[in-house]
Image (cartoon, rainbow, N blue to C red):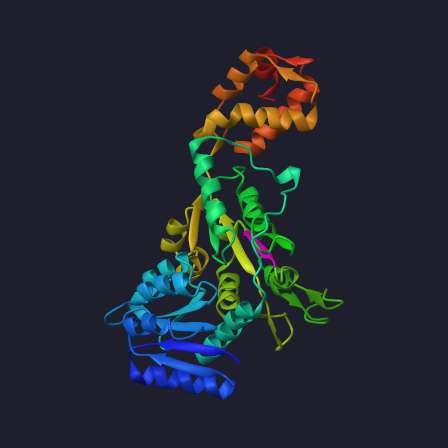
Amino acid sequence: MAHILIVEDEVNIRRVLRKVLEEEDATRIISEAADGLEAITAFDKGDYDLILCDIKMPKKDGIEVLTAAQEQLPNTPVVMISGHGDLATAVQAMRLGAYDYIAKPPDLNHLLQTVRSALALKEKPTKATRKKPIPKQYTMVGESSAMKQIYQIIEKVAPTMARVFIQGPNGSGKELVARAIHHQSTRANNPFVEVNCAAIPSELIESELFGHMKGAFTSAHKDRKGTFEQANGGTLFLDEIGDMSLAAQAKVLRALEEHKIHRVGSDKSIHVDVRVLAATNKDVKAEIKAGRFREDLYHRLSVIELQVPSLNERAEDIPLLVTHFLGQLSPTKELTPSAMEALQKLNWTGNIRQLRNVMERLHILGGDTISDEDVTNFTQL
């Protein structure tokens, strides 16, 4: 029996929300608060399984209610209700820990699906965040100030449900950041599923993401789960999402809003509990301005934005990275100090990926001790 608190200063909206929630499940206990101050006062009177909270209200606004709820009811999900002009504040609320937001006037199907998902989250037994060891091939290496800042953000965001938008140049380690977030989250023992959106033809991306039914198209010889289903309970990493078609973007947005998907060729909806991380090497705001990326999807994905630096921006990490890669390739090989200096002076346009390839080349072609001459001779092949 769920206890839901509706915090909304407009009487008519409160009544509609109460009616919809009670009609779906008559066992629910619905409480109401007419403003933010009344809501915060109510936190002392009972435990709630879900809070639906308007953003703009007298006395105390939605952000103040959210902050108080996190202090007094830390295990209770809060869903924000935003007016047309409150989108930026709604996104800010999600960055502060809100479960989701619903735009006014609320789409009732979206509302009910969000309520079900939030209540299911509340019903799960709470577990202390367990940091699962990251496989060696996905270890992040670096002690520069830029990397320390990334580690700090990962540590803060990993235990939450917040979606993270990872930006940075090709080869800079965006996938490693996504894996670090997953492995330090409470979903660490569940699947991590990666989709390279740039590598999948636009006509196949929907089937890849949402799955298909047998006979849905010519080559659909059997039912197939999509990556949203494969990642259920875990993390879905949409790499290079900036290359996804607008049509596919619209369907991803709908899946994020409704927490459900439809396989190609089926009308049946499938509930999915997935944390979505996304990454791109493109300037997203420029893509939005050019009409190639949906602004509403950007706001859904970018609860937390994380910028991964290029290798040239963190050249002080090169010795650590070189030692790391060389240890994987040949622990007995060493570099002369002049060779290390030469590596640090190079222009790493391909970032970490390029450095890894160069170290493999030097391991194969260089001498027993890699010299600056080896670096000169074998880095430009």
Residue found at x 53% / y 20%: 343
Q: Looking at the image, which is closer to me, 218 or 270?
A: 270
Q: Position of residue 126 (x, y in %)?
A: 56, 62
Res. 259 visible in picture: no
Instruction: Return the x and y of residue 169 as percentages of the image width and height.
Output: 48, 39
Q: Identify whether 319 is placed above or below 162.
A: above
Q: Name, please, the residue furthest toward the right.
A: 221
Q: Position of residue 351 (x, y in %)?
A: 52, 32
At 59% from the left edge and 51% from the top edge, which residue is drawn? 130
Instruction: Residue 151: tell me if it is visible.
Output: yes
Image-quadrant location for residue 50: bottom left
120 relative to 147 in the view: left or right: right
Q: Is residue 102 above or below residue 235?
A: below
Is 26 left or right of 69, judged from the image as shown? Answer: right
Vertical placement of residue 117 versus 171, above or below: below
- The overriding secondary structure of the stretch rendered in magenta is strand
Q: Which residues are magenta?
A: 234-238
